[in-house]
């Protein structure tokens, strides 16, 4: 009864605390914040100068006195203090309605994190102002967010490709039958593009440029009409600014090894799936969520590799945040699903 009363007087929130982006869902209001997981700090005082969108604009462009960094790495906290400051900023930003109690917070985390990493997330959220912290595995949150019927006695398979991790989960009867994750995601795709540009053209580019290339012309399988893009950077030999045009075929080659590791993860999960649940997946297939799911023709590549139907979630970027929010809205019993 006391907890229900606290819930009425608080802004309970769900957080997709991602390596690349943080999304916040506020109960009864939906997703109200979607910003990069980037913080700019003063190197001398450790004072936070900017968070989110404003901090991302500073990446690669800061003076010696300021550093713009990502406090999350591979889906987990790499810098405890900066993550806490970032969470406090986001929680304060969305709590613009007067409430008498601190919020209950559901945080989506990679399913393969260690107990030390779980404790770091809980402590960061608590210090940032949470009354209670519930950790929900990201693939489970994604499955809830895209509307899979996870309570039914049938196989529901989700592949969540985030900034720092790729995770696959098979869920049935409201519990996880199998889950596996690798610390490969959008950041590794960006790094593969950066390395390719340096190796093939002696062109040095920043992470923002690499991400732009991935979004605009990245693909996992041949396109019906191949694309080109003008890229600007610095010649690593001459040391001068340089501009060139690259094709989607080249970027596909650059991404091939990283995407292959995602394909192998999915195949391994299917090999571990119990026979009865495998039979369900023949017709139902599986769903792709997360920012990485938006790579062109990744669904086609995975379908060819597995022989199963593959569906890209309608709003792949928001799936995890929606899942945390739906859990809050429905007061879902997450005893079996939380970590």
Image (cartoon, rainbow, N blue to C red):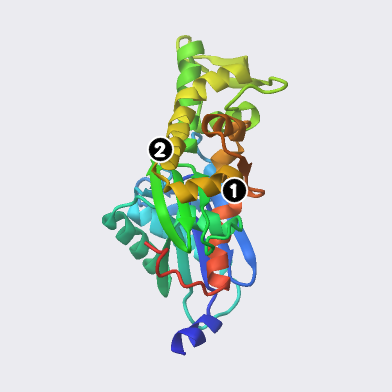
**Residue 295 placement: quadrant:** top right
Pick whichever of labels 1 and 2 is earlier in the sequence.
2
Q: Is residue 209 left or right of residue 179?
A: right
Q: Is residue 274 above or below residue 31?
A: above
Question: Most extreme residue toward the left, as rendered?
Answer: 116
- Name the disc covering residue 268, or none: 2
**Few, some or many C-alpha atoms within 10 Å of disc 1 (few <14, some 14-19, many ≥20)?**
many
Write down the residue under mark 1. Answer: 317
Q: Is residue 79 above or below residue 309?
A: below
Q: Is residue 313 above or below residue 218?
A: below
Image point (41%, 39%), residue name: 271
User: Residue 75: x and y, percent?
Assistant: 41, 47
Image point (67%, 48%), residue name: 314
Q: Is residue 296 left or right of residue 143?
A: right
**Few, some or many C-alpha atoms within 10 Å of disc 2 (few <14, some 14-19, many ≥20)?**
few
User: Residue 212: x and y, percent?
Assistant: 60, 32
Image point (37%, 45%), residue name: 43
Image point (51%, 49%), residue name: 157
Residue in front for this viewpoint, 213 or 300: 300
Give the secondary structure at mark 1: helix
User: Residue 161: x and y, percent?
Assistant: 50, 42
- Where the C terminus falls, by quadrant? bottom left
Residue in front for this viewpoint, 307 or 180: 307
């Amino acid at each position: 009864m006391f907890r229900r009363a606290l819930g009425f007087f608080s802004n309970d929130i769900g957080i997709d605390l991602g390596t690349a982006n943080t999304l916040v869902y506020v109960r009864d209001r939906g997703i109200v914040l979607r910003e990069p997981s980037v913080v700019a700090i003063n190197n001398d005082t450790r004072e936070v100068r900017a968070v989110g969108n404003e901090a991302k604009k500073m990446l690669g462009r800061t003076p010696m006195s300021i550093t713009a960094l990502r406090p999350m790495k591979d889906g987990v906290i790499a810098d405890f203090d900066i993550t806490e400051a970032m969470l406090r900023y986001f929680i304060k930003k969305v709590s613009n309605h007067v409430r008498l109690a601190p919020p209950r917070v559901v945080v989506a985390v990679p399913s393969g994190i260690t107990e030390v990493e779980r404790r770091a997330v809980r402590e960061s959220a608590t210090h940032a102002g949470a009354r209670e912290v519930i950790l929900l595995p990201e693939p489970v949150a994604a499955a809830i967010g895209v509307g899979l019927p996870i309570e039914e006695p049938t196989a529901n398979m989700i592949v969540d490709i985030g900034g720092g991790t790729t995770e696959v989960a098979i869920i049935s009867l409201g519990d996880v039958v199998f889950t596996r994750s690798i610390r490969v995601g959008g950041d590794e795709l960006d790094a593969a593009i950066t390395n390719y540009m340096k190796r093939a053209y002696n062109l040095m580019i920043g992470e923002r440029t690499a991400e732009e290339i991935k979004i605009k012309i990245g693909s996992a399988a041949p396109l019906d009409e191949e694309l080109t893009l003008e890229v600007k950077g610095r010649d690593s030999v001459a040391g001068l600014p340089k501009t060139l045009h690259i094709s989607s075929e080249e970027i596909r080659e650059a991404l091939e090894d990283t995407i292959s590791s995602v394909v192998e993860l999915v195949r391994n999960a299917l090999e571990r799936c119990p026979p009865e649940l495998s039979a369900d997946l023949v017709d139902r297939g599986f769903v792709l969520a997360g920012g990485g799911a938006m790579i062109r023709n990744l669904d086609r590549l995975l379908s060819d590799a597995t022989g199963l139907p593959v569906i890209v979630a309608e709003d792949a970027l928001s799936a995890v945040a929606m899942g945390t929010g739906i859990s809050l809205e429905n007061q879902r019993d997450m005893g079996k699903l939380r970590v």
